[in-house]
Image: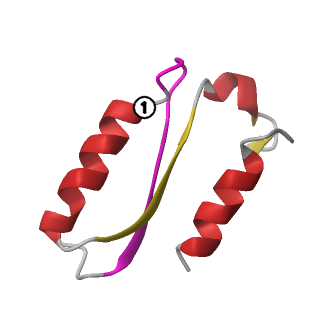
Amino acid sequence: MYQQKPCLFLATAPGANDGQTVLDLATRTAPFFGADVQDSFSLPRFPDHLQSDALNLKDNPLLKPLQQSVKCSH
């Protein structure tokens, strides 16, 4: 399915668990479908961190780890 391509898995949810359960399941099982999982990132409580008018992350401490995850996946 993924054809051994590098993948970055992302998850978010409105709650404090931030989709972590689904993200963990995806990153553990994706290699069985040919994914080369490079990194994963989960964003907790997305309504608190997302600028809905621009669909951008507000400037906060989570922005740098996300940027690092994206750079590592290139």
Q: Which color scheme does this rendered protein use? A: secondary structure
Q: Which residue is mark 1?
A: 19
13 left or right of 35? right
Question: Where residue 54 sits: x, y (%)?
Answer: 81, 44
For the N terminus, the image quarter is: bottom left
Q: Residue farthest to the top?
A: 15
Task: Give the magenta part as a residue range.
Answer: 5-17
Q: Quadrant of residue 51?
A: top right
Q: Quick one: label 1, few (<14), some, or many (20+) residues within 10 Å?
A: some
Magenta stretch contains residue 13: yes
Q: Quadrant of residue 49?
A: top right
For the C terminus, the image quarter is: bottom right
Q: Amino acid at mark 1?
A: Gly
Say which element carries label 1. loop
Which is more toward the observer, 46 or 41? 41
Number of numbered callouts drawn:
1
Question: Where residue 7 sits: x, y (%)?
Answer: 40, 69
33 left or right of 59? left
Q: Residue farthest to the right?
A: 59
Q: Is residue 33 above or below residue 65?
A: below
Q: Is residue 27 above or below residue 13?
A: below
Q: Residue at x 64, y 73 (%)?
A: 71
Q: Residue at x 40, y 34 (%)?
A: 20
Which is more toward the observer, 30 or 55? 30
Q: Is residue 16 above or below residue 55?
A: above
Q: Quadrant of residue 46?
A: top right
Question: Where residue 64 sits: x, y (%)?
Answer: 75, 54
Q: Residue at x 76, y 43 (%)?
A: 57
64 left or right of 15? right
Question: Where residue 3 sits: x, y (%)?
Answer: 23, 82
